[in-house]
Every structure is written in C-alpha cells, then in structure tokens.
Image (cartoon, rainbow, N blue to C red):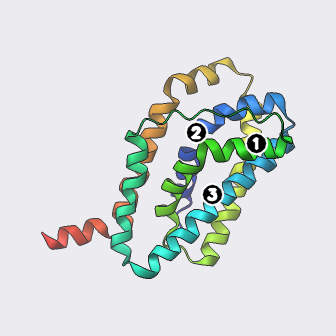
C-alpha cells in the first residue's frame, strides 16, 4: 500500500472541504466536527472500495487503470459545490451531511481507482490511516483557522493545487495498474 499516494489522495479530495471546515469549526465543537467529518470520509472511502472490488471481479487490472480518468476529469471539470445550511441538525449530522453534499462525487471518483487493488486487510489499514489523517486534519484546520495568510492562500491557490494533485493521482493510477505498459505493449 502506498501511503504517500493515499495521503495525497486524501488531501486532494478534501482540500476544498478544509475551507468549509473552517466555518464549521467556528460554529461547532471540534469533537462534533471531527466525528461527522470522519464518518463521512470513512463512508465514502468504503463505498469506493466495495464498488472497486465489484468491478475487479469482472475486469482485468489493467482495464481498471482506465479509472484513472476519473481524477483527471474531476481536475478539469469545474465543480463549485456549496455547503448547504444544515443548522436544523445536530453538529455531527450537520458536518456529515455537509461533507457528503460537497465531497461525495470527488471522493468516489478519486478514491475508487486508488483503492481498487487493495485486499480487505490492506483496505482496513488504509481506512485506519485515513481516520488518523481525518482527525489530524480537523485539529490542523482548527489550529490554523485563525491565520489570515492561510485562508488567503487557500482561497487564491487551493483550486489549482487540488487540480494538480487530482491529475497526478490519475496519472499514477494509469501507471500503477499496468495500463500504460499494456498500451505500450500493443504498440
């Protein structure tokens, strides 16, 4: 399992949500945001893994490498999702619903090709790693949320950074799945 790729994927699919999390953390307790956010991440990651496993039953690994197009598509597709007001829900549910509304599509598209080749044991380790990253992200966002330079930088460059990472993840999936070597062999 490539923890660097997993970390970059986690950052890429959540970068836009980190800005939203700044606002959630001003409104709710850290614990509530951490629980709602982590539930959302694990739910979408699990859905990606099990969809990938179902596809892997029917398709060879190199064909699954074409799923690398999903992160690249997400990078070039302009997606300006907004968080919906969830004030009528508990803070945990509000965070979870906001996360699912904003991040479901890109999480499924980006994590699916990355997780497809993992065994259940490797996926469990990856999920635990992502849970740790999720909690760390909430604490980090809370800690830097009051720094104006950070918010300005993410506002100005967060979108392009996220797109670069998505493209990188997509290209890595092409390579790691054997798709590139299979296509080269055909030439």
- Classify 16 as above or below 49: above
Which residue bears the numbered disc 1? Answer: 95
- Mark 1, other Cα within 10 Å: few <14 / some 14–19 / many ≥20: many
Q: Are marks 2 and 1 in contact (CB under 8 Å)?
A: no
Which residue bears the numbered disc 2? Answer: 15
The residue that appears at 87% across and 37% down in the rendered structure is 29
The residue that appears at 74% across and 55% down in the rendered structure is 39
Using the numbered discs, state the Cα–Cα distance from disc 2 to disc 1 in whole angstroms: 15 Å
Q: Determine the image quadrant of residue 18.
A: top right
> Where does the image place residue 16, in percent across and percent down from the top left?
58, 36
Q: Quarter holding the N terminus? A: bottom right
Which residue bears the numbered disc 3? Answer: 44
Q: Secondary structure at mark 1?
A: helix
Please give the label number shown on residue 103: none
Residue at the front extreme, as displayed: 88
> Where does the image place residue 21, in percent across and percent down from the top left?
71, 35
Using the numbered discs, state the Cα–Cα distance from disc 3 to disc 1 in whole angstroms: 14 Å
Mark found first going from the N terminus, 2 or 1 = 2
The residue that appears at 21% across and 68% down in the rendered structure is 183
- Seen in the image, is 99 located left or right of residue 63? right
Front label number (2 vs 1): 1
């Amino acid at each position: 399992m490539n923890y660097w790729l997993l970390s970059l994927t986690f950052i890429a699919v959540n970068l836009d949500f980190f800005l939203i999390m700044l606002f959630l953390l001003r409104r709710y307790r850290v614990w509530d945001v951490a629980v709602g956010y982590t539930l959302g991440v694990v739910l979408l990651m699990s859905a990606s893994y099990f969809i990938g496993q179902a596809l892997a039953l029917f398709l060879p690994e190199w064909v699954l490498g074409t799923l690398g197009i999903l992160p690249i598509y997400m990078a070039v597709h302009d997606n300006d999702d907004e968080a919906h007001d969830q004030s009528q829900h508990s803070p945990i549910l509000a965070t979870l619903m906001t996360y699912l509304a904003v991040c479901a599509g890109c999480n499924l598209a980006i994590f699916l090709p990355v997780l497809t080749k993992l065994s259940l044991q490797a996926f469990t380790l990856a999920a635990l790693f992502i849970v740790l990253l999720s909690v760390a992200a909430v604490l980090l966002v809370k800690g830097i949320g009051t720094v104006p330079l950070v918010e300005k930088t993410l506002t100005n460059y967060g979108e392009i950074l996220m797109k670069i990472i998505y493209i990188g993840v997509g290209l890595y999936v092409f390579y790691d799945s054997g798709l590139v070597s299979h296509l080269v062999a055909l030439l």
